[in-house]
Image (cartoon, rainbow, N blue to C red):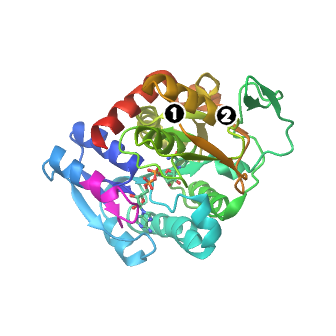
Amino acid sequence: MKILITGGAGFIGVNLAEFLLGKGEAVIILDNLSRPGSEHNLAWLKKRFSRKFDFIQADIRNFRSVSEAITDISTVYHLAAQVAVTSSVSDPQTDFQINAAGTLNILEAVRKNCPEAVVIFASTNKVYGELTHLAISEKNNRYFIPKLPEGVSEKTNLDFHSPYGCSKGAADQYVRDYSRIYGLKTVIFRQSCIYGPHQFGNEDQGWVAYLTLCALQNKEITIYGDGKQVRDILFVDDLISAFELARDRAGKISGNIYNVGGGKENVLSLLELIAWLEKELKREIKHKFDAWRPGDQRVYVSDIRKAKEGLGWKPSVSKKEGLKKLLFWLRKNL
Ligand SMILES: NC(=O)c1ccc[n+]([C@@H]2O[C@H](COP(=O)([O-])OP(=O)(O)OC[C@H]3O[C@@H](n4cnc5c(N)ncnc54)[C@H](O)[C@@H]3O)[C@@H](O)[C@H]2O)c1
């Protein structure tokens, strides 16, 4: 039986496909190639694995295509999505159709065609909203939440913010509920900021790769907010190892939700990234400031203790190591 990766030509998808194909697994990628850079990723994968996988160019909004693809499948990694908060604000209907209705298409196809399949879903920390009820402090040019030294746990109230937060949040809850109501083997990962090779970051999504790319190209960076906002960054290989552990245990952990990110050891602010790039590139990185964007959390750090305990997982690539790997890849592939 084959493994299906929706959004498999995207950043996380292509890294996952490379990992699975390297292990000799049979992989199908379903992607509509709407993300700039996804064609490049797909071409790279074809070259690397000499067409040893199937590719279906299709849209997850089309139930028939999804249903045809989800036949004799052992695992579905559902990664395809409209990924930018900004685009969701300018076109909430398309965002909803892809992220919420598209996910329901995946679940229905699994329920009808392959009810034994494992479904791993890439959710987001945006389901927790701006966390404005928590007091924020500032130290050494970065924000932090004194009340949450370990970060944000899965017990935090849901507070969908922005159309993207709403559509991914709805999908997150459907994926969880299909485990309860229909007994599907679903696992949800609420991902923080993931970064790594094959990431074509832009101003709207993928800030670590985008800032690094701008720095390499000597382009001026616009920081929305004051740059003191922080995220816990997770190198993509570590996300894939969490996916693997979940797939192996899916029968036992079905319906579970895990916050995954670099955790408190791998927190980075925008200003810190710029300072790090200046040190690495040995020159000043031009940047200016603009207004905050809707739904942009001042602080988000994942509490990863549930994933550590439940999956026996922890990040293995430090932020310093991961950033160097990303810089190396971008330099080679500019
Ligand atoms: N990268 C992160 O930091 C991060 C953080 C939280 C959650 N996520 C989630 O992880 C998943 C993967 O993210 P990514 O960073 O690899 O994004 P990406 O944009 O690189 O990959 C998404 C892929 O989905 C495809 N796609 C988009 N709409 C589609 C549609 N209607 N039908 C079929 N394919 C479609 C795109 O062409 C792209 O290849 C997404 O669901 C995203 O919401 C990512």
Q: Position of residue 302 (x, y in %)?
A: 65, 34
Residues packed near mark 2 inside 10 Å, few (<14), some (14 to 19) or many (20 plus): many
Q: Quadrant of the C terminus?
A: top left
- Residue sitting at 69 percent across and 40 percent down? 154
Q: Hey, which quadrant is residue 58 in on the image?
A: bottom left
Residue 14 position in % (x across, y down): 33, 48
Left or right of residue 173, residue 254 in this image: left
Q: Which residues are magenta?
A: 30-42
Residue designated by label 1: 234
Please state the horizontal and vertical placement of residue 47, each as a whole percent of the image: 16, 48
Q: Helix or strand or loop: what does disc 2 sit on?
A: loop
Could you say which is closer to the camera, residue 149 or residue 229?
A: 229
Q: Amino acid at mark 1?
A: Leu
Residue type at mark 2?
Val
**Res 23 → quadrant:** top left
**Identity of the residue drawn at 41% across and 26% down:** 324
Q: Earlier in the sequence, mark 2 or mark 1?
A: 1
**Image location (x, y in percent) of residue 111:** 46, 65
Q: Is residue 251 above or below residue 145?
A: below
Question: Foreground residue, 53 or 175?
Answer: 53
Residue lying at 51% horizontally and 50% vertically, measured from the top left: 122
Rounded to the nearest angstrom, the CA distance separating label 2 from label 1 is 11 Å
- Judge the density around disc 1: few (<14), some (14-19), many (≥20) Cα neighbours within 10 Å: many
- Residue 60 relative to residue 227: left or right: left
Q: Is residue 91 magenta?
A: no
Query: Is residue 50 placed above or below 320 in the rendered structure?
Result: below
- Give yes or no for residue 35 being in the magenta stretch: yes
User: Number of labelled discs?
Assistant: 2
Residue at image mark 2: 301
Mark 1 near ligand 1 (CB under 8 Å)? Answer: no
